[in-house]
Amino acid sequence: MTAVPTRRERHRSATLKEIKQVARQLVVDSGPTAISLRAIARELGMSAAALYRYFPSLEALIADVASEIFDELSAAAEAAGRGEGEVDAQLVAMARGFRRWSIAHPQEFALLFGTPVPGVAEMEAECAPAEHPGARFGAVFVAPFARFWAELGRPPAPEDPELRRRLAPMYAAHGDILPPQAMYQFLIGWIRLYGVVALEVFGHLRWAVDDVEPLFEAELAAFVVGLRP
């Protein structure tokens, strides 16, 4: 039988949720560097010292907020690919979902994928475990990519120990789900996807195009076509 939370536990849970909501709103309003214990305490009408009863440090709080945003992004990408029949169509739909979420949440995107702020920097240094929020987000794409790679029917390539060694962090996060050559192709795909989306979110393509979507779609199509034998 599940124990009923005590009043104190319910109050603590509600306060934790409120702290993280305020921290995220600071990000939305003013960017990732706007999160501070003092600013959060001011919004909540409590002292900055009191926040240490809920989080051991500002870095821990930021990491918690970033983890929740990673999970939100993972859910958005999965939802975008749901209902697609073919696995390649699912991957394309998920990539589009990633772009839509990123454009709609530019400051949260900056927190996860921009210049690392304290808290997120520590997360990036420890991203190998499969349960890490960043690894969970990656797994959302790696799993269907592995199915797509299998459907392509490519002849097995000779094992490349050096390439596997260079990709050790990815194997630590995702297991032996793909051979090294396929894992490398997945990495190339992520770099292309992230590159276009990041340039768009941060406004670095305004000098070149007035609509980034056709460029994004062209990159997406070229990557998928390039994988086929």
Image (cartoon, grey):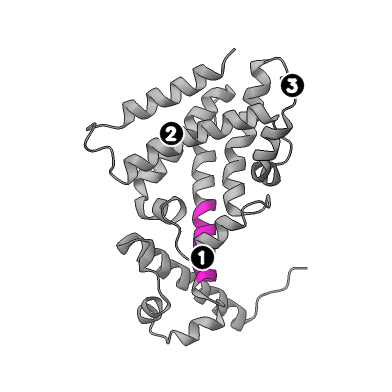
Q: Horizontal and vertical percent for residue 220? A: 44, 26
Q: Label for residue 96?
A: 2
Q: Residues within 10 Å of mark 1 (few under 14, many from 20)?
A: some
The answer to whether 91 is drawn above or below residue 10 in the figure is: above
Q: Nearer the viewer, mark 3 or mark 1?
A: 3
Q: Nearer the viewer, mark 3 or mark 2?
A: 3
Q: CA distance from mark 3 to mark 2?
A: 33 Å
Q: CA distance from mark 1 to mark 2?
A: 28 Å
Q: Horizontal and vertical percent for residue 12? A: 56, 78
Q: Amino acid at mark 2?
A: Arg
User: Which residue sits at x=35%, y=44%?
Assistant: 103
Front position in the image: 125 or 95: 125
- Mark 1 residue element: loop
Q: Specify the farthest residue to the right.
A: 1
Residue under numbered circle 3: 158
Q: Quadrant of residue 45?
A: bottom left
Q: Label for residue 221?
A: none
* 23 to the left or right of 12: left
* Numbered range of the magenta stretch: 59-71
The answer to whether 218 is drawn above or below residue 14 in the figure is: above
Q: Amino acid at mark 1?
A: Gly
